[in-house]
Structures are given as structure tokens and as C-alpha cells.
């Protein structure tokens, strides 16, 4: 099973047969090194040949060649948007539905863009459809899927916070973590949410239920959310952490508070 593979520490150490399987979309990447090593153009070409959609390759390749900045993320996004455009034009829902459960994590990342950037869906529909990607077992899919809906969250953050506050009660830690990570005031590799930078209290509906969450994955995200906020509203973060530690002085809350205050307490 893929989960049992540790993955190489450097790209040059990835066995040739593993790289072939990755580029054919037969297995998931085991770590970030493998994720960065996949040739997404080759993976796309193999996918389209395997599914008799070779005519999609050149139009998407043209988009990739026009990218000013070629990174794993920009290529990932451009392929996702290319697939979205072509499947909409060709009414090719059958192809899309097959890809959403594809064994290759990078292909599932592309599909996340076909949801998050599909203007036919409103914000609520996008979040509902992206939830299964938020629960994905692969780290890469979980990171990409929140980035695909981040522009909507930024534009409609009050509506999104109301929806995502319900996700904080979910049994799946990955879904709870999405609620926090996707609404971070500054975030990583994404636009900032100015309203939350200036008034982080607007996010408490999401943060409060997670302040003593049992999952370290969730704790890290909540701590980072508050650390983001501390860069523009340090007093707010100090007050919230003090309040939380008074009301629920658990080891989980202590961990979150320490992470939240790390920039202030340098």
C-alpha cells in the first residue's frame, strides 16, 4: 500500500520504477519530495491517453506554456482550470466524476480546481462539494482544496464562516482543520483576508469550538490562525489566549496558545 511507503528524501533518490508509476498516475505521492518530482505535464498526457481524451492535451499545454511563473502550484492550478474549461465546453461530466476518486493525488488536486473555480456553483455549493476533498487522506489534496475556494471565502467570508463553523463539529479532523486553515487571516500562498486581519474576532465562531481540539493537526492550524492575527492585532490574541487558558486550561489549549503567541513572545 502507498501509505506504507516513506518516500525518498531527495528527488534523485526516488527509484525509477516509483517515478514511472507516479507519472502514470498509478500511485499516490508518499511525501513532499515525490509531490515536487512528478512531471505534471507527463501525468496529464498519460491520464488523457488512458481516458481517450487526447484532444484535451494541446489546449491545456498551451495554457501551461503561457504561465509567467512555473511552480508546482501554478501548473496544478492551470491544469485544473484547463480541465474545467474543456469539460464544461464538451459537457464531459463523466470524465470529471471518474477523476474525483482517481488514485493519483495530483489528479484529485486538479479536480478540486474544477469545483472551487466553477462559476456555475455559488459559494455554499462549492463548500459542500469540496468537503470530500477536505477529508482526503492525502496532504496535497487537503492543501490545494482550501486554496481553490479561498477567493470565495475572501469575498464572502461572513457567509463562509457561518457554514464552516458547522464543520468544526465534524468527526473528521481533516474537515475541522479545513474550517480553520481556509479562513486564516494571512494564510500561506494566498491572498490575505483584510477584514479578519483588522477584526479577527469575526472568526471566533470557528476558533472557539476548536480551542481544545484533540487533534494536533487542528491545534496547529488554530495556533497559526491566531499567530496570523497577532501580526496586526496582538492585544486581541493575548486576550483570547488568556481567556481560553482561564476557562479550559488543557494541554491542547496550552499548545494552541503557545503557538498563537510565538511572534509576540519572541
Image (cartoon, rainbow, N blue to C red):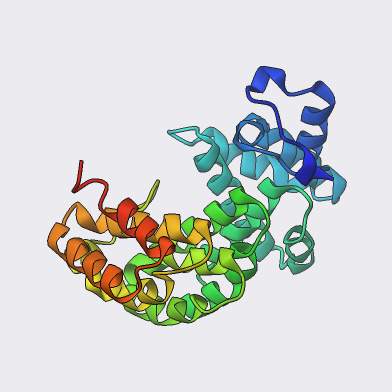
Decide which of 138, 258 is in the foreground and name it: 258
Quadrant for residue 222, please give it: bottom left
Report the residue at 69% width, 26% height from top: 8
Q: Is residue 202 left or right of residue 26?
A: left
Residue 148 visible at all: no
Give residue 118's position: percent from left, percent from top. Answer: 54, 67
Decide which of 26, 80 is in the foreground and name it: 26
Quadrant for residue 152, please give it: bottom left
> From the image, which quarter does the N terminus lie in?
top right
Q: Is residue 28 left or right of residue 9?
A: right
Give residue 94's position: percent from left, percent from top. Answer: 79, 66
Decide which of 117, 249 is in the foreground and name it: 249
Give residue 69's position: percent from left, percent from top. Answer: 44, 33
Give residue 206's position: percent from left, percent from top. Answer: 38, 74
Report the residue at 75% width, 39% height from top: 45
- Vertical side of 175 occupied by 12: above or below: above
Amino acid at each position: 500500500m502507498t501509505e506504507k511507503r516513506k518516500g525518498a528524501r531527495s528527488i534523485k533518490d526516488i527509484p525509477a520504477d516509483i517515478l514511472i508509476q507516479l507519472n502514470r498516475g498509478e500511485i499516490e505521492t508518499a511525501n513532499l519530495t515525490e509531490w515536487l518530482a512528478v512531471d505534471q505535464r507527463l501525468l496529464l498526457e498519460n491520464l488523457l491517453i488512458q481516458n481517450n481524451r487526447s484532444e484535451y492535451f494541446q489546449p491545456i499545454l498551451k495554457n501551461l506554456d503561457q504561465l509567467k511563473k512555473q511552480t508546482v502550484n501554478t501548473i496544478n492550478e492551470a491544469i485544473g482550470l484547463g480541465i474545467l474549461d474543456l469539460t464544461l465546453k464538451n459537457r464531459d461530466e463523466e470524465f470529471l466524476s471518474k477523476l474525483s476518486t482517481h488514485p493519483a493525488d495530483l489528479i484529485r488536486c486538479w479536480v478540486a480546481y474544477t469545483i472551487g473555480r466553477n462559476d456555475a456553483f455559488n459559494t455554499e455549493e462549492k463548500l459542500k462539494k469540496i468537503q470530500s476533498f477536505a477529508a482526503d487522506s492525502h496532504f496535497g489534496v487537503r492543501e490545494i482544496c482550501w486554496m481553490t475556494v479561498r477567493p470565495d471565502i475572501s469575498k464572502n467570508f461572513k457567509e463562509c464562516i457561518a457554514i464552516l463553523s458547522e464543520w468544526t463539529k465534524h468527526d473528521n479532523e481533516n474537515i475541522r482543520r479545513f474550517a480553520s486553515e481556509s479562513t486564516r487571516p494571512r494564510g500561506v500562498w494566498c491572498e490575505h483576508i483584510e477584514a479578519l486581519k483588522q477584526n479577527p474576532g469575526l472568526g471566533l465562531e470557528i476558533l472557539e469550538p476548536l480551542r481544545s481540539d484533540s487533534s494536533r493537526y487542528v491545534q496547529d492550524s488554530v495556533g497559526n490562525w491566531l499567530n496570523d492575527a497577532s501580526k496586526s492585532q496582538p492585544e486581541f490574541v493575548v486576550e483570547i489566549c488568556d481567556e481560553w487558558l482561564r476557562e479550559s486550561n488543557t494541554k491542547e489549549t496550552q499548545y494552541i496558545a503557545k503557538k498563537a503567541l510565538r511572534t509576540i513572545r519572541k
